[in-house]
Image (cartoon, rainbow, N blue to C red):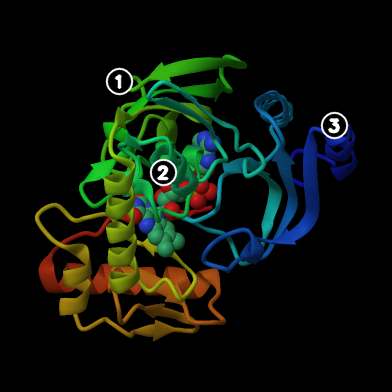
Amino acid sequence: MTGLKTEELLSFIGGGCYEYTLDAPASELTSFRTGGKVAAVVYPKNKRALCALLRFLSERDARHITLGCGTNVLAPDDGYDGVFVMTQKMTRISLDGSVMTAECGRGVTSCASAAQKAGLSGLEFAYGIPGSVGGAVFMNAGAYGSEIRDIIKDAECWDPEQGETVTLTKDELSLGYRDSILRHNGMTVLSARFALTPGDGGEISAKMAELMSKRRDKQPLEYPSAGSVFKRAPGHFTGKLIEDCGLKGTRIGGAVVSEKHAGFIVNAGSATSNDVKALVSLVEERVFAEFGVRLERELIYL
Ligand SMILES: Cc1cc2nc3c(=O)[nH]c(=O)nc-3n(C[C@H](O)[C@H](O)[C@H](O)COP(=O)(O)OP(=O)(O)OC[C@H]3O[C@@H](n4cnc5c(N)ncnc54)[C@H](O)[C@@H]3O)c2cc1C
């Protein structure tokens, strides 16, 4: 492992606050179902354990990345010689009046369901987004006209520079279109607070069902993918640009531009990450040649 001996890591994470696997295929950890072996995958069970692990890895300059559900990333085919720090065991959630606090590994869809049960509105848009709270804050995830920025109050984060936890307010998070300060400052979200508003449970549930049905109609959910590969191009519908280039159904290896939604690239069964990358480049080149529009990727290459 780059910067770290496996025995050193194992000795640090022994003691019950972590689960781990060694040499795990990234294809089982990411929604694209591609990618080679990851040297170590560690699942901290609470915030303190996550911070301690991040401090330990930073101090040793060990290669690592924090992931939630792996639904917006593409892992390298030739493996990752470092540590995937996965937050999926950190799922605590609580309500204080209409303010929800959720740990970073909690799924945003599950947060939306919990809000609905409590008669709280604001998270309906997130129902159906397959990522975690941490990933959603990092990306400022959004759908159907709403985004995390609309509801977030603040986020407790691990600051690797200071070696301590800090609370970033909504303004300090600098949430923009699929962007936040976290994409630039290396901090890790430990938990986030969402300011919701009292609403009618039945209406909230109906809205969630309506949005989920839209997803099922428009998105190729039957195939592995990472959702929309590209950001919205200003003044354009990205899917339409790709479709108008005649690229629907275009295939490289096992990666295919979805017939259902041209903004999605799907893994039709045997795709490698390199197939996906080659197809992404092809789409970018064709859209630029045809319309002079430079697409920007939402999908993160690890
Ligand atoms: C079928 C499908 C539909 C989708 N629909 C939508 C949609 O409607 N809207 C939308 O915005 N996205 C959508 N996505 C993309 C994806 O689900 C979101 O971007 C989601 O927020 C990513 O969360 P994650 O936990 O999977 O993040 P990951 O893929 O695990 O990580 C993404 C990035 O976030 C960082 N990260 C993860 N956790 C933390 C943390 N705790 N602290 C700091 N950084 C962290 C990672 O380092 C990485 O850089 C979709 C994806 C799929 C597969």
Mark 1 vs mark 2: give the one in front. 2
Mark 3 vs mark 1: give the one in front. 1
Compared to 193, does 69 lie above or below? below
Give the residue at mark 1: 171
Residue 112 is labelled as 2
Residue 239 is labelled as none
Q: Residue drawn 30% across and 30% down?
A: 198
Q: Find residue 76 and report its horizontal and vertical position in percent.
A: 58, 61
Compared to 254, does 29 lie above or below? above
Q: Residue drawn 37% across and 69% down?
A: 280
Residue contact at pointers 1 and 2, CB within 8 angstroms: no
Q: Is mark 2 within 8 Å of ligand 1?
A: no
Q: Is tag 2's residue or tag 3's residue first in the polypeptide sequence?
A: 3
Q: Residue furthest left?
A: 235
Residue sitting nearer the eye, 238 or 275: 238
Give the residue at mark 3: 12
Residue 160 as seen in the image, left or right of residue 237: right
Residue sitting nearer the eye, 198 or 16: 198
Give the Cα separation between the discs numbered 3 and 1.
36 Å
Q: What amino acid type should be assigned to the residue bearing mark 2?
A: Ala
The image quadrant of residue 246 is: bottom left
Residue 280 as seen in the image, left or right of residue 267: left
Q: What amino acid type should be assigned to the residue bearing mark 3?
A: Phe
